[in-house]
Amino acid sequence: MNENIVTLERHILEEQRKYGGRGDFSSVLSQLVFAAKIVSAQVSKAGLVDILGNTGDTNIQGEEVQKLDAYANNVFINALNYIGRVCVMASEEERDIILIPDKYPKGEYVVMFDPLDGSSNVDAGVSIGTIFSIYRRKSKGSGNGDVEDCLQPGYSQYAAGYIIYSTSTIFVYTTGAGVNGFTLDPAVGEFILSYPDIRIPERGKIYSINEGYYNYWKKGTREYIDYLKSDENTIKKPYSLRYIGSLVADFHRNLLYGGIFLYPEDTKDPKKPTGKLRLLYEANPLAYVVEQAGGYASTGYERILDIKPRDLHQRVPLIIGSKLDVLEYEKFAKRNNM
Ligand code: AHG
Ligand code: MN
Ligand code: MN
């Protein structure tokens, strides 16, 4: 084996040696890698097996549950609940926290995830993903964790990352010492280091937003998008609009190329005044990744990672990507959205 080939397993081991861990975190991450391979195998043949379409249920978000949502959710729960390293989980697909079954030992870590992001795109074969966030437990003892373990601010994440199931399956994560990406080689079933030390450009030329909601946005948001397209924008014209409708895919492209993704608050759904995206399962983990790559993530008014979560399914406006672009949006939002 060429010693320059760094598999994700090797990277996890080397990180463990570097930080002198006992291997508990490594086994949590390795199980996430295993679950990602399982989901990737199903996604790649989604059109061939009965895993497309919806289950007929609606989840806590009030959204139709796609079969792949439910499938991926179970894969990640079952990959983590028996290893004795996790004390509690939470999922975008589950109303309450997920306790570890009595028959299994509990551990020090809290794992939360959006098991399948972009699920409305599944039937069309468009890129989708999984987003995960890992904390150390705050609750005392060695039994089950509790909801407070899940409501920690984003800056205390121990690790975070995502998997994108696309033309290739890529596993991107950070443990607070930079961001690395690994591409799955299906021939050997291993993730191989393909994007070492990812850095997002300070300013991009791409903006990602659902322009169909223009009339629902607040004034400052409309003004910012108008500005990007106007002659006033002397920085870099023209920005290109790229919006796939899968957060992980839009985020991953902007992370590599530079750019800004916006899911601002809008007046479309009075039940969701702060926008659609979830703090625990989407905003916090991607905010950790983007800041570790030199970018920034904000609600338009405050840093995402500083928010003290109120509840498991709290939604926040998410403005994320190249630092100078996000800071520029904040000027418009603070001036005319407040
Ligand atoms: P999920 O499939 O986990 O519910 O997430 C879907 C999200 C996100 O992936 C994407 O950015 C956004 O929904 C698109 O929403 P709109 O269709 O309202 O633009
Ligand atoms: Mn999602
Ligand atoms: Mn989802």
Image (spheres, rainbow, N blue to C red):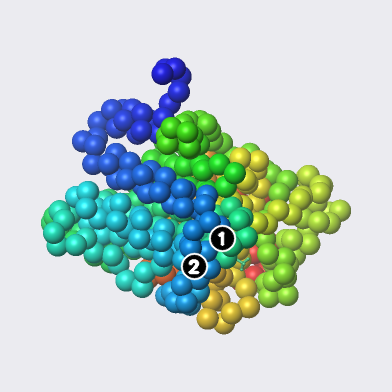
Quarter of the picture holding the C terminus? bottom right
Residue 166 screen position, x and y as percent = 57, 47
Q: Residue at x 53, y 56 (%)?
A: 48
Q: Quadrant of residue 232?
A: bottom right
Label 2 sits on a secondary structure element that is strand
- In the displayed structure, 80 sits above or below 27; it is below
Compared across the picture, whether 165 is left or right of 244 comes to left
Can the viewer see residue 319? no
- In the displayed structure, 139 sits above or below 255; it is below
Q: Which residue is mark 1?
A: 122
Residue 117 screen position, x and y as percent = 51, 59
Q: Quadrant of residue 229?
A: bottom right
Compared across the picture, whether 261 is left or right of 136 comes to right
Q: Which residue is mark 2?
A: 66
Q: Residue at x 65, y 41 (%)?
A: 257
- In the displayed structure, 245 sits above or below 286; it is below
Most foreground residue, 152 or 39: 39
Q: Amino acid at mark 1?
A: Val
Can the viewer see residue 52? yes
Asked if the residues shown at circle 2 and circle 1 are in contact, with their CB atoms under 8 angstroms apart, the answer is yes
Most foreground residue, 111 or 128: 128
Q: Quadrant of residue 220?
A: bottom right
Q: Residue at x 68, y 64 (%)?
A: 210
As drawn, the label of residue 170 is none
- Residue at the limit of the structure toward the right, as seen here: 231
Residue 191 screen position, x and y as percent = 44, 35
- In the displayed structure, 333 sits above or below 2; it is below
Spatial CA span between label 2 and label 1? 8 Å
Q: Residue at x 56, y 36 (%)?
A: 199
